[in-house]
Image: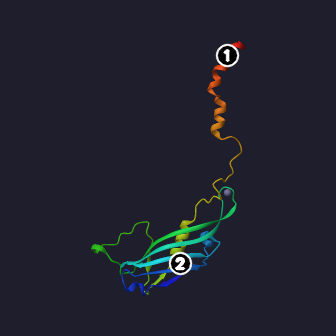
């Protein structure tokens, strides 16, 4: 998915938004898409590059790590990425731009084409749950009294303790 951002780059502060559905294949990444990826993005020319915000929504088929049942889960991703302009970045005080680990920075090609493929793939792969579970109750809880109640039965009701003493005396 490539976007021409030549118009956007003409003026700092300029924005554009985009809605699209794509049908990529991420089988190799372990993503089994069940429906197209709905993309909603907003682009902002920050001067040093282009800030991309928006959302990705799709559904994937996965397998429960507990019962191995196949099930489908929705995948929702909040996008927050920055595309830096090659060789044209603003360098405050002449230094390098400090990038935090959280930021993914993609080089903006000189021909003003923004390639969103990597952004979309990386974000979907990161949103994938590591240990998907089909439901909170999986695996099913074994039938029987809750642990707390079982404990009370063993200790006995304190009101019966006196009576137990009387029975004991009589038995002697
Ligand atoms: Zn399960």
Left or right, residue 15 beside residue 122:
left
| Ligand 1: quadrant of the figure | bottom right
For this view, does 104 lie left or right of residue 165?
Answer: left
Q: For residue 89, what is the image quadrant? A: bottom left
Helix, strand or loop at label 1? It is helix
Q: Position of residue 2 (x, y in %)?
A: 51, 83
- Give the farthest residue toward the left: 93
- Front in this rendered view, residue 122 or 80: 80
Instruction: State the image coordinates of residue 97 (x, y, percent, origin top left).
Output: 35, 72
In the rendering, which numbered label is found on residue 154? Answer: none
Q: How crowded is mark 2: few (under 14 residues within 10 Å), some or many (20 or more)?
A: few
Residue at the spot 58% in from the left edge and 79% down from the top edge: 21
Reading the chain from its start, which is encountered first: label 2 or label 1? 2
Q: Please name the residue shown 55% across and 70% down the image.
A: 124
Q: Mark 1 points at which residue?
A: 166
Question: Dividing the image into 4 quarters, which one contains the N terminus?
Answer: bottom right
Mark pair 2, 1: CA separation: 82 Å
The structure residue drawn at horizontal position 45% and vertical position 73%, both measured from the top left corner, is 81
Tell me which residue sits at (46%, 77%) in the image. 42
For label 2, the residue is 117
Q: Which of marks 2 and 1 is in front?
A: 1
| Label 2 with label 1: CB-CB less than 8 Å | no
């Amino acid at each position: 998915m490539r976007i021409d951002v030549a118009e956007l780059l003409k003026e700092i502060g300029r924005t554009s938004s985009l809605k699209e559905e794509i049908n990529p294949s991420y089988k190799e990444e372990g993503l089994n898409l069940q429906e197209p990826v709905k993309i909603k993005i907003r682009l902002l020319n920050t001067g040093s590059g282009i800030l991309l915000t928006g959302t990705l929504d799709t559904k994937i088929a996965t397998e429960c790590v507990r019962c191995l049942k196949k099930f489908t889960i929705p995948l929702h991703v909040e996008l927050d990425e920055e595309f830096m302009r090659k060789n044209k970045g603003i360098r405050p005080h002449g230094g390098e731009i400090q990038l935090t680990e959280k930021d993914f920075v993609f080089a903006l090609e000189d021909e003003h084409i923004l390639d969103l493929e990597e952004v979309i793939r990386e974000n979907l792969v990161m949103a994938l749950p590591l240990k998907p579970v089909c439901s909170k109750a999986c695996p099913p809880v074994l039938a029987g009294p809750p642990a707390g109640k079982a404990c009370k039965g063993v200790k006995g009701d304190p009101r019966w303790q006196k009576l137990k003493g009387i029975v004991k005396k009589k038995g002697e």
